[in-house]
Image (tube, helix red, strand yellow):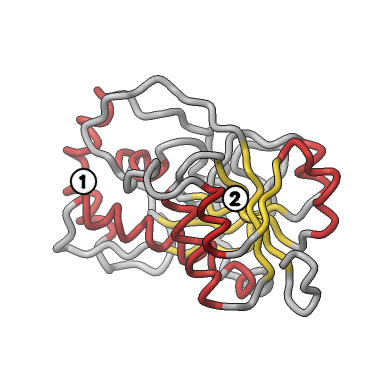
Amino acid sequence: MINDKQRPSVSLITYDIPHKKTQDVLSRLMLLGRYSLSLTLVPFKPRPEREVLFQHRPVQRTGPDPYRLAQAHGVETFHLGDWRSFHPQIDYFLVCGAGLLEGEFCESAQILNVHPGLIPQTRGLDSFKWCIHQGQRLGNTLHRIDAGVDLGTVFHHRLTDVWEQDDIAALALRHYDAEVDLLINFEGHLTGGTVFPLDTGEPTKRMPASVEAQMLKNFAGFKRKFAATDNGPG
């Protein structure tokens, strides 16, 4: 499929293990039928298990392994370590799951990502939780990957609706679904997107359990501040 020049070529950067977001994105891109698709696989490096008070993203390590997934959809697989040999064939790389990417690769290819925070204000890990804890507007950002941490060219900010009736689980799922939807519909936002003027924040790390407990207490105030009342970030 990679040689189908009638359609833009898109490769999903993902782990070499089962990964839910990759499955969600690939299946919906296949339904669109607009792209010649492939997977670019990154070796997964396990991290120590962490106990969290609230799991804000769906369980990701589930479903078929990427080779079986690719076979089922009839798409090619590549390995990130060989990027120099195949990246000229790819119009867009979409990040579904990866750690830090090599700087030369980022400079040589069009690598797009959706970060679950409003860049450059909200950067780093656990952005959903840190937005609630710090009382910042919640949204996703379509951007081009560069050597910085969640920086690069911003193409589009999409705010996540907050409703008075939400519990934190409902809001987290809506935020994740919006992240996936923005990545799938990336091409429509590469020009003319909505970009808010935001100050640059410091990148965050995983939220410690002690802070997470306070974040959960802050959720009611977060809703009062943002529930269907504004049209821009605060």
Decide: is 164 above or below 56. Answer: below
Asked if residue 40 lies left or right of residue 46, the reply is right
Of 129 and 100, which appears nearest the observer?
Answer: 100
Residue at 40% in and 20% down: 48
Q: Mark 1, mark 2: which one is toward the viewer?
A: 2
Which residue in the structure is indicated by mark 2? 95
Residue at 59% in and 53% down: 113
Residue at 50% in and 39% down: 17
Q: Which mark is residue 190?
A: none
Q: Position of residue 19 (x, y in %)?
A: 45, 46
Secondary structure under badge 1?
helix
Asked if residue 140 lies left or right of residue 145, the reply is left
Asked if residue 12 lies left or right of residue 160, the reply is right
Picture quarter containing residue 134? top left
Q: Position of residue 54 (x, y in %)?
A: 23, 38
Decide: is 98 above or below 37. Answer: above
Asked if residue 201 lies left or right of residue 3, the reply is left
Q: Position of residue 40 (x, y in %)?
A: 66, 48
Decide: is 95 above or below 43. Answer: below
Q: Which mark is residue 219?
A: 1
Secondary structure under badge 2?
strand
Q: Position of residue 89 (x, y in %)?
A: 82, 59
Three-letter amino acid code of the residue under disc 2: Val
Q: Quadrant of the C terminus?
A: bottom left
Three-letter amino acid code of the residue under disc 1: Phe
Are there few (<14), some (14-19), or many (20+) residues within 10 Å of tag 1? some
Of 73 and 148, which appears nearest the observer?
Answer: 73
Picture quarter containing residue 129? top left
* Mark closer to the chain start, 1 or 2: 2
